Amino acid sequence: MGDYLHCDRNHIRGDRSNYVSNHGPSQEGRRRLKPAGLLGMLVACALITSGCWDRIEIEERGFVIGVAIDFPKSGQAEDRADKEAGNKAKGPERFALTQQLVVPGALAGEGAGQGGDGGGKAYMNMTSEGDTILEMIRSTAARTSRSPFYEHIKIIIVSEEVAKSEYFASTLDYFIRYPEMRRGTKLFVSRGDARKVLEVEPTNEKLPAMYIDSISKNDYRNARMQPPVRIGEVHDKLLENEPFLIPRINADMNEVKIAGNSVFRDGRLAGFLGEEETEGLNFLNGQLHGGILEFEIEGGIAVMAVTWVKPYIQAVIEAGRPVSFTIRMQVEGNLHETLKPLSLEESRMYEQIEKEAEQEVIRLCELAVKKLQNEFAADVIGLGKWLKTERPKVWNAVKSEWNGEGGMFSQVSINIEPEIDLRNIGSVLDSSRMHAE
């Protein structure tokens, strides 16, 4: 066996040497191929390493974390622009864009005055005016050493005035279309100027935009807050021409408050829902993720922490058209506080607490329904969505006349039937013993 293997290897070596001698390049040919091979290697390396040709160092980027969109307060900037480029194409309306950029040095606490703002702030707000959003962003690049970079933007705030105009959707076009933008960016509508919201200086945060973003996440603790709305969701609603909601934000001194709702119909702001109306709407559409419910009982006040809400919709259809809806909802909660001495040793007190809580839910829901039907004619409750899913033939027949003044949504009867389930009363069974007579 060993001789066989030895002979076989010699045979292989012989064939290989014959192949090389007959077909392989000569020594002189190999010398001629070396420069060509080297050139090929250089080209390959150039192609592999050219992926970062447009790289911008992180310390040279101007990270934009929030923007505010307003109408200009004066025509001075427009007059200057006309002098510079009088024949430039003009849009139907001018806007004022305020961008909040991070100042990395001040954010890291490296000393006051860094970043050029002179006050040691971790951010700087820059306002530009123009006919388009992109024009204003590019004009900012001529005024700051760091070019605006939008991949980390958190919030967009639109003023009430802009939201009510026909240009609301147009102002969002750039933020939806440009690849750097994120569809998860949160939207807000401000009462008054949007830029003033970004000028708030919170005492416990360095960046106002991040402070606002953090507050928006607290909807699970406050029933009067609308859950965050992303620009991608608004884009979908605009494409479908459906009513939608955007949280309302107000600025006051060194703090902001996110409470209440902005109701949009036909692509523009129809009006605002107050805090109680927003709470009622959150019960109706199942968007209440937490918070408290205060209600009267025996001349005092009790407070229930809401832990779960599930609405169920039923409709009465006559002649192929909806005439009434009943929204039944299951609500669970825990009794957290009473400002009235109560003895819960008797089952009747449980029933009374649940009954009073149900009446308060009905009151809040009816406030929301009344305003949505009579003032805004906008179905943001989700009745049309329910019809589309559960009664598609009916929906196809009525969808063109559902929203808007004189629409069917404003005419249908809506009944509210909550069912409260008190799951926990805490560690106090009889609070009457705690109070002096």
Image (cartoon, rainbow, N blue to C red):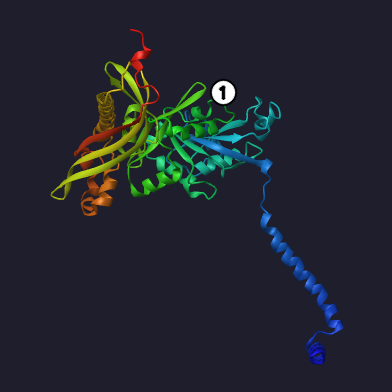
* Residue 248 figure quarter: top left
* Residue 120 figure quarter: top right
Task: Give the left or right position of residue 321, taking residue 168 as reference.
Answer: left
Counting labels gives 1
Counting other residues with Cα less than 10 Å from the Cα at mark 1, is it few (<14), some (14-19), or many (20 or more)?
A: few
Q: Residue at x 41, y 45 (%)?
A: 233
Instruction: Give how far across and how far down residue 200 sits, in percent.
Output: 53, 26
Task: Give the left or right position of residue 204, taking residue 390 as reference.
Answer: right
Could you say which is closer to the camera, residue 143 or residue 88?
143
Task: Give the left or right position of residue 43, taking residue 270 as reference.
Answer: right
Vertical arrangement, residue 226 with respect to residue 340, above or below: below
Q: Mark 1 points at which residue?
A: 203
Quarter of the rendering occupied by the C terminus: top left
Instruction: Give how far across and how far down residue 289 sits, in percent.
Output: 39, 36
Tell me which amino acid carries mark 1.
Answer: Thr
The answer to whether any part of residue 85 appears in the image is no
Q: Could you say whether the residue bearing mark 1 is in a helix, strand or loop?
A: loop
Vertical arrangement, residue 96 with respect to residue 239, above or below: above
The answer to whether any part of residue 430 appears in the image is yes
Instruction: Give how far across and how far down residue 54 sits, in percent.
Output: 66, 52
Residue that sits furthest to the top in the current view: 437
Residue that sits furthest to the left in the current view: 319
* Residue 298 figure quarter: top left
Could you say which is closer to the camera, residue 65 or residue 164?
65
Could you say which is closer to the camera, residue 215 or residue 235?
215
Quarter of the rendering occupied by the N terminus: bottom right
Could you say which is closer to the camera, residue 255 or residue 7?
7
Q: Which residue is drawn at 35% across and 24% down?
A: 303
Instruction: Give how far across and how far down residue 122 sits, in percent.
Output: 62, 30
